Image (cartoon, grey):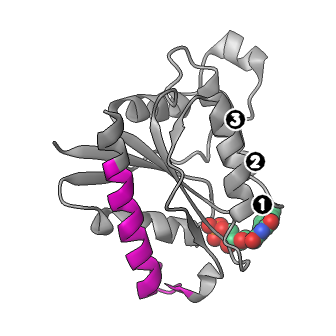
Amino acid sequence: QALKIVTLLGSLRKGSYNAMVARALPDLAPQGVIIEALPSIRDIPLYDADVQQDEGFPATVEAIATQIRQADGVIIVTPEYNYSVPGGLKNAIDWLSRLPNQPLAGKPVAIQTSSMGPIGGARCQYHLRQILVFLDAMVMNKPEFMGGVIQNKVDAQAGQLIEQGTLDFLTGQLSAFSDYIRRLK
Ligand code: FNR
């Protein structure tokens, strides 16, 4: 049957290379697989248990959680900051982790990191995997997508990922992730 996959973007900037990767995905998805972007994490406040207690969860966190619950899988698309997970993405995950009926528990997840460095955010990828252990997400092991020197693989003017080898690899990963989701169902 048809699958719905949602993407969570770890970069906030307008010219984000990771946003270009995320935007390429819907056209690369196998037949019968729909890929949609989750709301931006931009306006999620810093996690504070007092805020959670007094004001509840931010609307954006609730909206992201609802869409994750309704989806068959999640792809996290993110840069690496200082050899690890960008603070904004970690903050969003921290909020999500405090929700009753925590939405990533048991959820198939794939990770895509891209960076300007040669190893494409590999170190972030393994830190992110460690975080997702505690959230009990079902993170696909392979294929791993690490987009190195990503600035050379895009048309920055058009805001598009254009390097054919990278597009082909992503097509393969999406196919593998769809199979992985179906196996887990
Ligand atoms: C970076 N960048 C970076 N790159 C990398 O390969 N490894 C790293 O550890 C870091 N660390 C880092 C920290 C901070 C605070 C910034 C702002 C940047 C460079 C990074 O790959 C580059 O800025 C990308 O363009 C970020 O991805 P987006 O925003 O283009 O999606």
Mark 2 neighbour class, 10 Å CA radius: few under 14, some 14 to 19, many 20 or more: some
Q: Amino acid at mark 2?
A: Gly
In terms of image quadrants, where is residue 158? Answer: bottom left
Q: Is mark 2 within 8 Å of ligand 1?
A: no
Residue 80 makes an appearance in the image:
no
Q: Amino acid at mark 3?
A: Pro
Look at discs 1 and 3 and give the one toward the viewer. Answer: 1
Mark 1 neighbour class, 10 Å CA radius: few under 14, some 14 to 19, many 20 or more: few
Residue at point 74%, 29% (across, down): 47
Measured Cα–Cα span from mark 2 to mark 3: 12 Å
Secondary structure under tag 2 reads helix
Per the image, the residue denoted by label 1 is 81
Per the image, the residue denoted by label 3 is 45
Q: Are marks 1 and 3 in contact (CB under 8 Å)?
A: no
Q: Nearer the viewer, residue 169 or 18?
A: 169
The correct choice, above or below, for 127 with respect to 155 in the image is above
Specify the label residue 32 is tagged with. Answer: none
Q: Is residue 125 magenta?
A: no
Q: Position of residue 136 (x, y in %)?
A: 58, 29
Q: Is mark 1 within 8 Å of ligand 1?
A: yes
Residue at point 39%, 29% (across, down): 69
Q: Tell me: 143 left or right of 27.
A: right
Q: Amino acid at mark 1?
A: Tyr
Q: Are marks 1 and 2 in contact (CB under 8 Å)?
A: yes
The magenta stretch is 153-179
N-terminal label among 1 and 3: 3
Residue at point 78%, 55% (across, down): 84
Q: Nearer the viewer, residue 170 or 64?
A: 170
Per the image, the residue denoted by label 2 is 87
N-terminal label among 2 and 3: 3
